[in-house]
Image (spheres, grey):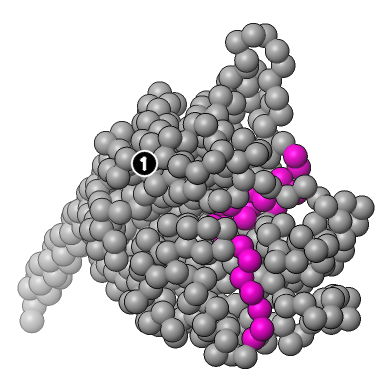
Amino acid sequence: MGKAAAVGTAVVVCAAVGVAVVLARRRRRREAELLGSAVAERKRRAAAVIEEVESSLATPTALLRSIADAMVTEMERGLRGDIHAQLKMLISYVDNLPTGDEHGLFYALDLGGTNFRVLRVQLGGREKRVVKQQYEEVSIPPHLMVGTSMELFDFIAAALAKFVDTEGEDFHLPEGRQRELGFTFSFPVNQTSISSGTLIKWTKGFSINGTVGEDVVSELSRAMERQGLDMKVTALVNDTVGTLAGGRYMDNDVVAAVILGTGTNAAYVEHANAIPKWTGLLPKSGNMVINTEWGSFKSDKLPLSEYDKAMDFESLNPGEQIYEKMISGMYLGEIVRRILLKLAHDASLFGDVVPPKLEQPFVLRTPDMSAMHHDSSHDLKILGAKLKDIVGVADTSLEVRYITRHICDLVAERGARLAAAGIYSILKKIGRDKAPSNGSKMPRTVIALDGGLYEHYKKFSSCVETTLTDLLGEEASSSVVAKLANDGSGIGAALLAASHSQYAEVD
């Protein structure tokens, strides 16, 4: 090849290389533009979903007031005995709350959700109060929550018998006396006396054959007999009634109790003459504790989102317990999961492939949601670890973590504000929502609160309290106190067992 030809070939090669480099640069630039466009589109879609969630979960104060008004109306219907009332307003047959004079050894069984507690307490009267107490918590295997009545109550009675066997010398049962039990049963019951009541329906994920319409005290008593346990149920109470009794034992100004845990409910002290459906003699105290069963409240004013509606439709009890499904610990994490799933589908939040674990109902529990919500580290490391464990995404961007925490915040805030509206409705019903018109000083009003959601989810509980203050206004809120009543329902059941002891008249 001649020199000129070689030079020509080199020029052609160089030109080809140059063209290739230019084309590669253009391709990379185009790919970068496409990638940037895809990222921008994902962000736009994510923003659209988040904006829709913010709008559908919004709870302005004016809306909360109208929800409270609607709840008061339902409370009044329930007290009249209206069969169509959403709130059953169940009469508890507790017309005298603990005084502090109670003494002796008493047991309590607190069945309220996925766990139950057994408790014993030695009461020492007004001077010594609670001398000593012990309790154990037992988890209910999931299959028993959807099994048979006998299987469930036999499991409970066996755990109770085992607990009684550990009774130490610090607890004293007078010779010849039968052990007595207060039974906290945190499901809707048609109470027929202080120690009997028939189950209306299961809630909180329970669906057990053969118990609805049956006396739950008889079910437990038969199970205890099968275990060879000599114990008498002297008081059947709802967890809110138990919490109210325990709260009043510690503070005479307690007028209501609210449970915010796996489920939610409220009880309060009502004037007996304000209960039209009460047919017996008016109690000497003039008061009666009412179990509202407020979890069943529903209204077109409630801010139901598409996520709530889908969750309700797929639940064991569609169309029921709507208020509970919006604010209780059983459901908050699931609402968050459904929103994150929407973001995964519509905005590829966790990448091009939707994480299979995120498709599983209730895989995200409320305690996990709480841990993510409370993560205050600069890189949200705890939140990232939770997403890895729960969703199975090993590496999430800081933006994804912040979006996830924001969703937790939106769901928790709505739940807490709706819970506060419920408390406000009770205060309105008993006239404790504003200062007396005659100019006298507003009485101190204490709300006893119990449940893991309120106790452990601090952002939730603080939002309940600040919202209640907002609804009441400065003057009225200065006299209202929200007080944690830890294990109030267990202690309360034991106290009510004491006040209704079969030996009370001979003491």
Q: Is residue 56 above or below residue 126?
A: above
The percent position of residue 211, horizontal first and vertical second, equals: 38, 73
Q: Mark 1 packing: few (<14 Cα in 10 Å), some, or many (20+)?
A: some
The percent position of residue 134, horizontal first and vertical second, equals: 77, 72
Going 40% across and 23% down the picture, which residue do you hit?
62
Task: Identify the image quadrant of the N terminus.
Answer: bottom left
* Viewer-nearest residue: 195 or 182: 195
Task: Identify the image quadrant of the C terminus.
Answer: bottom right
List the residue tagged with mark 1. 81
Regarding residue 438, the answer to whether it shows in the image is yes
Left or right of 307 in this view: 281: right
* Viewer-nearest residue: 60 or 251: 251
Q: Is residue 13 above or below residue 469?
A: below
The percent position of residue 287, horizontal first and vertical second, equals: 60, 38
Give the residues drawn in magenta, as a range: 229-252
Going 26% across and 53% down the picture, which residue do you hit?
319
| Residue 130 among those drawn in magenta | no
Q: Is residue 221 above or below residue 36?
A: below
**Outermost residue, right direction?**
127
Going 30% across and 54% down the picture, which residue do you hit?
320
